[in-house]
Image: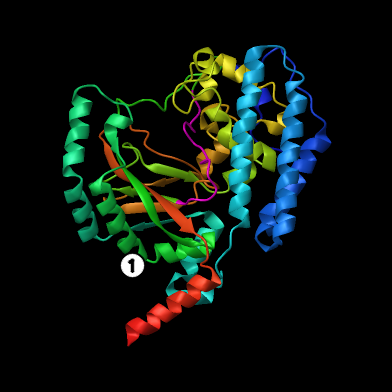
Amino acid sequence: MEKSLLNYDLHPSFKFREKPWELEQNLIDSFNEYYLTLQECGHVYKPKIKVLLKREILHKTDIIFSNLLKQTIENYEQTFLVELKEQTLRLVSEQINYFFRNKLNSDYNLFDKSLHSKIAYFHKNKYIIDSLKNHTISEINNEVQSDVANFRDNVAKGNLTREALSQNEGKVMQKIISILNKSFKDLGVLDILSIYTQRDTRVGGCALELSVPKADWWKNNFEGINRPPNTLYAHLDESIEYPKAIVYLTNVNEKNGPTSCYPKINESLALNPLQDIIGRIVGVVGSSDSSILKPYYMKTYHQSMNSENYRRHFMKLPQDMRFNSHFGWDVIPDSILEQKMINCEKKVVGNSGTFIVFDGGKLVHRGGLIEEGERLALQVIFTTKDKPSIFKRLRNKVKNKLFKK
């Protein structure tokens, strides 16, 4: 396997005297082998084989963490591994269930030929950039006037929390979801995503968000480095199931928070499956109000690594299990990885209506880092549903014939 460009052992802020916990390599290799088999062929296996494979993967996960727990020396370490195991089992189960679901026919010829080049581009690069029609943006902006006024009132009062500057519920959001579904369908976006996910795909939710310069949650400053990396907040999403979109409702330039993506960087990280899974959920550890680790870590937002206690626990994991999906803060300044990310960064700038649709679980991305002005945008989540059963397809055919009469 290609050597990863992300090596925490080389980062000055991740150097500790304690030795990592030890784990036989064959345990990780065995987990990865079973996982890759399911990832590639899960949807074609017979039910009994699926159950056996799922049971085997979960069993191997249990063995891995049991071995690590035997090496802990105090309660905080044990709790770290217990919570990490719980989150790992949760995500592994979700991903296995996703691989097992029925899929649609992925033949390009089933879709409008004008979309073929965009479908191919999305498969290769994991994103497309386009624009909504002017009348669509006008309709959306009319709907959100009241919410935007509330956001700006909160800014004036110094209330800059994400909750104070965003909205994702209510009749207005439902109306916008309806508007977006119609617009994305007309533009072919829903077809592109359906063939990519191999499942019927549509807009399932969205959040209206105002970003302003005073909200500087994305900044960091590790000890031992001369400057923050130029990759702050670059990350992968936890879910591999739901594509996303960012829709600008205001003009966006390089100074007021353009969304950026980094094609091919995920591949350059050269992660093994267990490492990738752990990286997507490790930031959840110690975040619950009921966890004894929360006051011990005192983390902020997605920046788990700003806690020295957290970093110490993280670095006790075997090297082949270490990853943090929000790794943009962890990149070493002037490293090969930082330069590679700078060179391939695609900044999405454009007028109101510009949008990027992307696979946030596979495409490294970031957004909302405001230096001046403001950015009003919609963060959109697409949902997928399985291929209808034979009974449902037959029932739909009967309905269609009745309606045609």
- Location of residue 362 with respect to 400 vertically, above or below: above
Instruction: Find the residue positioned furthest to the bottom.
Output: 405
Identity of the residue drawn at 57% across and 40% down? 340
Residue 248 percent across, percent down from the top left: 30, 47
Identify whether 290 is placed above or below 378. above
Task: Please tell me in which quadrant of the rendered image residue 167 appears.
Answer: top left
At horizontal 75% and vertical 51% (from top left) the residue drawn is: 52
Q: Which residue is mark 1?
A: 186
Amino acid type indicated by mark 1: Asp
Q: For mark 1, give the secondary structure.
A: helix
Q: Is residue 113 left or right of residue 51?
A: left
- Residue 357 visible? The answer is yes
Query: Which residue is nearer to you in this view: 269 or 172?
Result: 172
Q: Is residue 235 above or below residue 197?
A: above
Front position in the image: 256 or 171: 171
Q: Position of residue 394 (x, y in %)?
A: 49, 77
Q: Position of residue 291 (x, y in %)?
A: 53, 20
Q: Does the magenta portion include 257?
A: no
Prevailing secondary structure of the magenta residues: loop
Q: Is residue 178 above or below residue 59?
A: below
Position of 324 compared to 253: left or right? right
Q: Which residues are magenta?
A: 228-243
Left or right: where does residue 396 sit relative to residue 158? right
Instruction: Indicate whether residue 230 is drawn in magenta.
Output: yes
Crowd rating for badge 1 (residues with CA inside 10 Å; few <14, some 14–19, many 20+): few
- State the image coordinates of residue 17 (x, y, percent, origin top left): 71, 12
Q: State whether residue 250 appears in this view.
A: no
Picture quadrant where residue 160 is located: top left
Q: Judge by depth and name the residue closer to the eye, 289 or 273.
A: 289
Quadrant (top left, top right, bottom left, bottom right) of the C terminus: bottom left
